[in-house]
Image (cartoon, coloured by chain):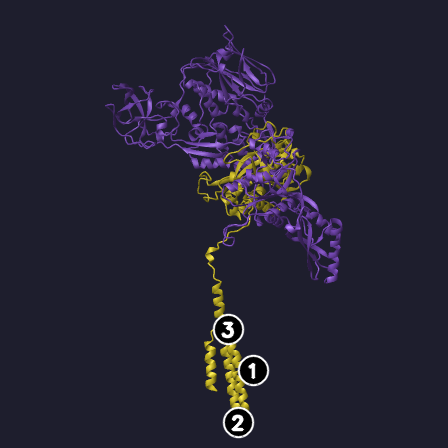
Chain colours: A purple, B yellow
Amino acid sequence: MIVTRSWLNEWIDLSDITTEDLAKTFNAIGLEVDRIHSYEIPKKIIVGKVLECEKHPDADKLNVCKVDIGTSIRQIVCGASNVREGLNVVVATIGAVMPNGTVIKPVKLRGVESEGMICSASEIGIEDCQSGIMELDKSVGKYKLGQEVCTLPTFADDLIEIELTANRGDCLSIRGVARDLSAAYDRPIKETNINEDEDKRVGIGRILSLSYENGLDVNLRYRAVDLKDLSLPFIVRLRLAQIEDSRETDIEALMLYVTHSSGVILRAYNYDFFCADNESMAKVELKKDDNGYASISSSKKASTVGIIQEDISKVTYAQGKVLLEASYIPPDIISKKMQESKIESGPMYYRTSRGSEPELNQGLNFCLNLIESNSKSSVFGGSIDLCDSYEDKIVTVTKKEIDEIIGAKINKVKITKILRNLGFGTTKSSSENFVISVPRFRHDISHKQDIVEEIVRLVGIDNIASKPFIFSESSKLEDDYFAYKKRSIYRHKAAHSGFFENVAFVFDEKKVLNGYGFNTTKEELELLNPIVNTFDTLRPTLMTGLLKAASQNIKNGISSVRLFEVGSVFNPTREESLKMAFLFSGDTQKENLANAGKPPKVDFNLFTQKISDVIGEFELRQYETSHSLSHVYQCAELLQNGEIIGELFRVHPSVEDSYGLEATYMCELDFVKLSYGLKVAKKSSKYQASFRDLSIIMPEAMSYEKVKAVIQASASEELIRFYPVDKYSDESLGENMSLSIRFVLQSFEKTLEEDNITSSMDAILESLNSELGIGLR
Amino acid sequence: METLLKEWYDKIKEAQSVDSLEDIRICVFGKKGVLATEFAKMKTAPNEEKSKIAKDLNTHKSSLMNEMTSRKITLQTQELKEAMKAEAIDVSMFSVSSEAGALHPVMETMDRIVEYFSAMNFAVKTGNMVEDDFNNFEALNLPKYHPARDMQDTFYFKDELLLRTHTSPVQIRTMMNNKPPIRMIAPGAVFRRDYDLTHTPMFHQVEGLLVDEEGKVSFANLKYILEDFLKYMFGEVEVRFRPSFFPFTEPSAEVDISCVFCKGKGCRVCSKTGWLEVLGCGIVDPNVFEAVKYKNVSGYAFGLGVERFAMLIHHIGDLRSLFEGDIKLLEQFQ
């Protein structure tokens, strides 16, 4: 919503208030200021009058004018096509520095002296509102010839653009904004009083009749005018340019101006459109159209009330009868209707749907007044109305409730003043009880909280002292908090272990995901309106996002890519679950002296080590993934405390290739399965531990998992740990290899003796031999 | 004897290594050393001279011992110095930067926000991203035809479910499942169908809600906690409340802080206004309480965008860079 000081001044006296203060007030009362623009018209640009205007002897397009500039008469050559005798114009005199930097000097134009320049709007730094030079008229206000333009409030104005919240349709007009200011500054609104000289006028009833269907929830009021010689006032042109809006015809421009000023939705209709052949009486019919909207028509549809006007019913002529319509539809009704069956809308729909001014007469009168004073038109007397009877909503609220919601004591007189200035009716049923009638233009007010909001914004939030909320209750550290905390702990561990946290959109590309064998959201549950094709489904995995980020980082010259993410993924039935994923690609360290500038690359061992730094001890089991991101022979499911919690693998070489990556390792885990909670310390033995290495000859193809299982099953309780430490194969071993396993034995009762150890080891060897057929070298 | 010992005094002084000093020690103090030989001579000395000789010898013994010790310390110090010199390195070649990873600034900011409200005894509540119309809109006083729905362009699914446009549905679900009093925050990802320089289709919010008996929760309470919170997050900033409009609160306000870049003087970031908008808040609208069937309660609510906080706190200029896993950006947060 754009307002200007001079425009506001027509509705409320702001002459003693600076624009800075005005902007501060706007912000304070909830009308957020988006932009302030001050028009600065240079000095020595003055008002003049064209006394004579003749064609330039040597140039077709130039005119030589004699211009009265108050103190003298100057000869000025002017190229504008609209320059003519009798016009009041804006003249840049000798020495004036124009906004574009040009200095006005006496010049000869094709041999003719010119002492100044007659200006167009853009030349003096205001909106381009009129083609050619500006034609000043009485709408500009009082001025004298020779007076500097920068002293005229119409020109030296300040423009303020306000960002309105969706509920404040009532502030979509100058009058509405002025009303809010009237409450903020506690000063009255200037209402225009129009004297209707009804007796001399032909009544509208003689030329128009209205028929209507009931129950259409619209308010309409018609007036008629016989249009003649309408000239659009300069100020209307200027202000429409300031609000960056325009209309094709003068009558429509005028109505737009009135709507922006008063908030009333206005339309002009071609009178003859409603007259059947050979009929002198216009018949306007209000009925439901095919979509159920209230519409105006004769033989054809003229408009959808408050939404859009058909071109065929528009006024395209400058002389003749015109029908003026003011309309109001309750905004909730029109918005709901639009939601149910959407139709094309016109420029006024926005105002209608946000809540326009319901006081139709006020806008119509303002409009007719403007027409009469700027043309030779004659207005028909009276009006034809179709208005519902509306009773103001009543909201009651007590002083105590107001104080409780705000948390401060607000003066009763102040409350009454604020509400009255905003247009509310207030009565007090008792000294502590307000009965408030809500004017129709404030459709957004229905509860006592709404009333409190009005008081809060006009008292000013900055004037309310802050108070702590006092509570007595138990701690709020409960399940979701622990889940958040767990997430936070694992994220910190991952970061400390060298991984960078990635945050990716939960959107991903269906085609790519399906290509890798991931199941995406079922078709019937799929996103209806994805923002781009590459984000057309919900991700079932974090891994593709990490690969993309890794690829981008490699392109950015990062040689060691270590990423992790904790985030939501979705299964085909769109159930959400939390995963934690890791990616490690490229160098394991930065280049430095110690690694001679050639840091080792990540391998399976280092990656598992890193993952274990984050999640603690785990086991890996040979595994085949359901997707094709993984290397076929370097792929494992990951178990913790016997439960499968995720997968860990090297990325398939062809996938690495397609993302431009070197050897890359990934791991994705079910976050809920990661342990969280208080650890229980294991009892540890005070006695010395013993170590034994066994080198077992076993087929290379045999999985260590089997060996492990046999050892676990046959081990004595003294065996507390065992792990492979060396692997060796050569030709002499053929299909076999030698695997050295280190055993750690310890007892809670004593230091183990050689005999105990040997018998433990023998038992293991025996089982390995009998169950797997393998044994010592 | 004097001359003989004088020679050893000189030898000790001139010894060039701990090893040669040890050789001297053996020659002087050893079983067959000079001193032992001299003491042995006493047997043959006249009795009246014996005590003087013994006295002289003992004096020499202890002063030789002192010489020995002090020379040893000097030599050891010297040798250690030389050994260290041999280990000299050029330290300027080693300027090590961390090999650690880092948390994402948005997540880290979210952690800080959660930390504050946990300390104020707000429960942390989370919910699903896929939501229904009732919890995301209807219950929040945003009926189907409400104009404010335009402000939140929504991702819909074919079965009419949607991706939550804010974390408010978590508040609705919490209220439906719990009795007042409620005091909670809902951190998490939210979605709007908007993708340009200053909008991403996914971003993060933290919303807060406090509900208690009617008449107990006031706007002044809301002001108090948000002022305190913003000072915790941004340091000593000025805080300004501007009345505004949200369908789910009434009265509503937007909260600005004095610009953290120009200290309120006016710069490009704050569009010359000196203020930065960081929060929306208000007293919970009665229609919201009606939707969750709460009676005789009062409450306040607030909401903020975590990306915006992170960008202001860490001076990050480009919103979209936050979603690219860009290690060049992330490693600055090691």
Chain ID, mark 3: B
Residue at 46% in and 21% down:
A255
Position in image of residue B97 (x %, y %): 51, 51
Position in image of residue A489 (x %, y %): 61, 48
* Residue A467 seen in the figure: no
Q: Earlier in the sequence, mark 2 or mark 3?
A: 3
* Vertical comparison of B85 with B297: above or below: below
Q: Assign a secondary structure to mark 1.
A: loop
Position in image of residue A473 (x %, y %): 66, 46
Q: In the rendered structure, which amino acid carries the disc numbered 1?
A: Lys
Residue at 43% in and 19% down:
A250
- Using the rendered view, name the quadrant where residue A637 is placed: top right
Q: What mark, if any, has residue B18 been given in the picture?
A: 3
Q: Earlier in the sequence, mark 3 or mark 1?
A: 3
Q: What mark, if any, has residue B46 been given in the picture?
A: 2
Chain ID, mark 2: B
